[in-house]
Image (tube, rainbow, N blue to C red):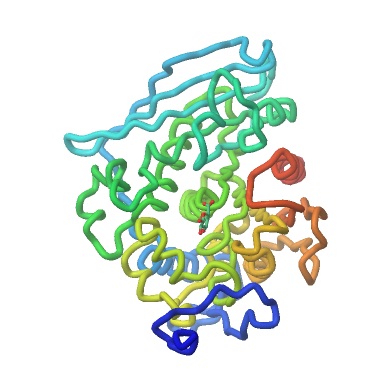
Amino acid sequence: VLLLGCPLAGRAQNYDESKAGTYVLPELLQTESKEKIDNAKDWETKRRPELLALFEEHVYGRMPASYDKIGFRLTRVDPAAMQGRAILKEVEITVTEKSDSVKINLILFVPAGRKKPAPAMLLINNRSRRNTLASRDSVSGFWPAEQVIASGYAIAAFHYSDAAPDNKDTYQQGVLRLYPELARADDGMKAVGAWAWAASRAMDYLVTDKDIDARKVGVVGHSRGGKATLWAAAQDQRFAICFSNCSGNTGAALSRRNFGESVAVINRQFPHWFNNNYKQYNDNEQALPVDQHMLIALMAPRPVYATNATKDLWADPTGTFLAIKHAEPVFALYKQPSHLPAVPPAPDTPVTRPPLGYHNRTGVHDLTFFDWAQFVRFADAYYAK
Ligand code: GTR
């Protein structure tokens, strides 16, 4: 009891909306030198690069500037997968830097019998590898390949541990092995950066595949994977759409709200996710030069879909809605009016009209058939334009 009033004890987790606190978000449309931004060109040449650099320095870490070589090896092609409804490809992506290399295994199903290249969804798989087995032995909503294929989309995935094991002691045993300078630096990327980087390497392959319409590749991720999708798509503008499912703290939820997971809690539990600099914001979110609405705004004018689940208060559904809502001014610079309501929509009432999509699904922290069905509706609406 004595510890409760002690600042060193850190903040207790709050789930009471009336205690979410008051906060002032950093200005989206004003540069660090206090210049107001009121058009897309200034956003792109001044504020956008500045924000990318701030997220790099203070949150996700610097990324590798290049690699020496990338190779793609088709280890398997099955032209009659899913009872003839899909073409299956398994691709080994090898990235070489100096004398070392890392392998990322990509699995891809493309709808069969198409005349035109297919739009695609790429999942950063942060759950069991079973979800994305080529055999389709266990069908789950986490990667419902059959459902997505039936909707006319190709579906791809790689397992995040190929890029960085999700463990504070071994996370450097992937991509970071190739970049020892980044691995040592306080502003260098850690696991979330490595997962995002790997999504871009998967994209490097997808742009070479004639069955894929490379202008229509959306990146999908759940929770920690959803944090990585936002960072991947913010930087790599080849991703047409970003889907961030239940991504919560340092994902699509505002950090300054005192609700659910906090920066201190995430940094203590997962010291290997964000860069070392980010630790200085433990119980000190108001000192951050950014907040997560800015990460979403970095996608503009490309659309973003964020989700939550009603029983996943840890990931702050209201704070997620507010983050995408606060990104609206940048989409407005591109004449992309938002169709989000003024207040969070009721559970299971998806907003699937681009550029900003959102739903709060009834249920628990998960990625489900329902979530993917909304992603397809959102993508359909965007590509039909
Ligand atoms: C939790 C973590 C969340 C989220 C989640 C997940 O333990 O606190 O930020 O990333 O794991 O990835 O499922």
> Which x, y percent locates residue 112?
67, 16
User: In the rendered image of this protein, does residue 104 appear above or below residue 251?
Assistant: above
- Nearest to the observer: residue 345 or residue 40: 345
> Which x, y percent locates residue 384?
76, 40
Q: Which quadrant: the C terminus?
A: top right
> Which x, y percent locates residue 59?
41, 65
Identify the image quadrant of residue 374. top right
- Nearest to the observer: residue 327 or residue 226: 226
The answer to whether residue 42 is seen in the rendering is: no
> Which x, y percent locates residue 307?
67, 54
Identify the image quadrant of residue 311. bottom right
Q: Say left or right for 374 vs 220.
A: right
Residue at 43% across, 69% down: 50
- Nearest to the observer: residue 93 or residue 127: 127
Residue at 30% across, 64% down: 187
Identify the image quadrant of residue 319. bottom right
Report the residue that reaches farthest toward the left.
Answer: 99
Residue at 57% across, 56% down: 247
User: In the rendered image of this protein, does residue 138 appear above or below residue 43?
Assistant: above
Q: Say left or right for 339 vs 3.
A: right
Q: How many marks?
A: 0
Report the residue that reaches farthest toward the front.
Answer: 1
Q: Say left or right for 171 vs 344.
A: left
The answer to whether residue 369 is seen in the rendering is: yes
Residue at 62% across, 54% down: 246
